[in-house]
Each structure stands twice: as C-alpha cells, then as structure tokens.
Image: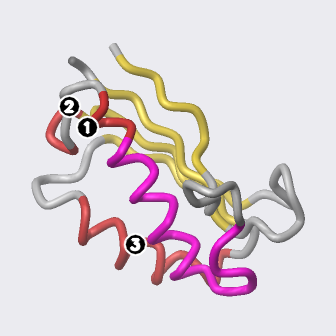
Amino acid sequence: MLFISGQTSVDGKGQVTGKGDAKIQAEQVFKNLEKILKSQGASWDNVLKTTIYLTDIRHMNVVQEVRAKYIKRGYPASTLLVVSGLARPEFLVEVEAVAAL
C-alpha cells in the first residue's frame, strides 16, 4: 500500500504555483501525485482512493476537469471536503491518495 499525504501546488523548486488560480494549482497537485506514483512503479490505475480538499466549493468543477485528465479509467473512491483553510493561505487545493502496489 502507498499512502500519499496531501499534495499542494508546490513545484519542484519549492515555489507555490498558480496563486489565486485553482485550475493551475490542481494541475500542479496532480503532477505531484503522478510523480510520486511513478517513483514507486505505480500509475493512476493503482489508486484506490483520493481525498480532495478545497477552500471554496466553486473550485470543484475545475479540479474535477483536471482530475479527469489524469485519471482515465473509472474513478477510485473519492471524498471531497470544503475546508476553511489549508497549511498556507495561498493553497486552494490539496489532494491525498491511497494506492495498492
């Protein structure tokens, strides 16, 4: 089992991408998740569950658009939560995942 903690829109240089833009942030989040999966010899097909955290429900559609670009098969079990804030005020989206290796 692979438990991937919540990924945010921090790029490989430690910089926050897409400040104020949920779609750009979601793209970075899913890129981060994919990088972790690949590093463990896994793919999106191995993902059993995701949990998506949003700071505003209005971001739901754009995050789902981005998710659909990465997860091509039937979606794994998924929970979406709207929260009052994430670890840093500029974060709009965070996603964690569980995969079976």
Disc 1 target residue: 38
Q: Residues within 10 Å of mark 2 (few under 14, many from 20)?
A: some
In the rendered view, would you say 20 is above or below 75?
below
Q: Residue furthest left?
A: 73
Q: CA gap, disc 2 to disc 3?
A: 22 Å
In the rendered view, would you say 76 is above or below 69?
above
Disc 2 target residue: 42
Q: Position of residue 45 (x, y in %)?
A: 14, 40
Q: Residue furthest front?
A: 13
Identified by mark 1, the residue type is: Lys
In the rendered view, would you say 59 is above or below 35?
below
- Residue at horizontal 62 percent and vertical 62 percent from the top: 9
* Dominant SS in magenta: helix
Q: CA gap, disc 3 to disc 1?
A: 21 Å
Disc 3 target residue: 64
Q: Which residues are magenta?
A: 16-35
Identified by mark 2, the residue type is: Ala
Tag in front: 2 or 3: 2
Numbered disc 3: secondary structure: helix
Q: CA gap, disc 1 to disc 2?
A: 5 Å
- Residue at horizontal 41 percent and vertical 58 percent from the top: 30
Q: Mark 2 or mark 3: which comes first in sequence?
A: 2
Closer to the camera, 51 or 45?
45
